[in-house]
Image: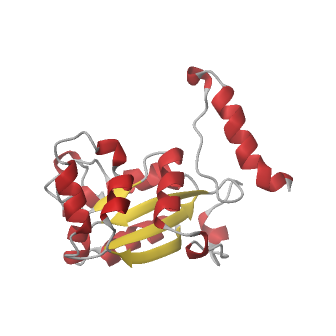
Amino acid sequence: MFARMLPHLARRAFQQLPRLARPRIVAIATGGIERTFIAIKPDGTQRGLVANVIERFERKGYKLVGIKAIVPSKALAEEHYADLKGRPFFAGLVSYMTSGSAPVIAMVWEGKDVIRQGRRIIGATNPLEAQPGTIRGDYCISVGRNIIHGSDSFESAEKEIALWFGKSEVFNWEFANAEWVTSDN
């Protein structure tokens, strides 16, 4: 019972701290391990980059705990990008994501510091500013076709995972080589 209440209590205690005193928190699955939402957009799917993206996360040592191909509804896309609603490109972005030209590959990845490290693997939103070696730095040249989305915080990871996945679609499983990837010795 206490274990189930712990994330809620920790979040409440965190919210009571003055903003500047707040430590960085992360989306916790179990044992301090984070989960993040990563989506390959239709341009990435059309260009055959799904395996390349998955390989980057797997090579880093992260565990895939949820994956599905989906053409999102307009309501889902609008809710996902609600923070961009006032931007001039919002309608075009929603239309593009829901066009059905190719599915979105929605994923949940798990591992130590996966939210922050996932953003580093992806690279800057503007591919022309993304470092070589990042997904966007290697595969993109346009912001409007930057092939991938990744959660940028604990709050967005939590919201996006719940938005795109039901509880039965995200799996808890033992990573056979976890001891070779993660250790604090």
Q: How is the image coloured?
A: secondary structure
In this view, which residue lies farthest toward the front? 75
Relative horizontal placement of residue 135, taking residue 21 as reference (left or right): left
From this viewpoint, is residue 138 visible? Answer: no
Judge whether 169 appears above or below 184 on screen: below
79 with respect to 88 (left or right): right
* Percent coordinates x, y for residue 107 in the rendering: 45, 69
- Residue at the location (39% across, 72% down)? 54
Give the image location of residue 127, x and y in percent: 20, 52
Q: Residue at x 51, y 68 (%)?
A: 165
**In the picture, which quadrant includes the N terminus?**
bottom right
Task: From the viewer's perspective, tell me whether residue 9 is left or right of residue 62.
Answer: right
Q: Nearer the viewer, residue 138 or 183?
A: 138
Q: Residue extending furthest left?
A: 141
Residue occupying the far right of the picture: 1
Q: Nearer the viewer, residue 107 or 63?
A: 107
Is any atom of residue 90 visible in this view? yes
Q: Residue at x 48, y 60 (%)?
A: 163
Residue 39 versus residue 85: which sits nearer the camera?
A: 85
Q: Position of residue 142 (x, y in %)?
A: 14, 54
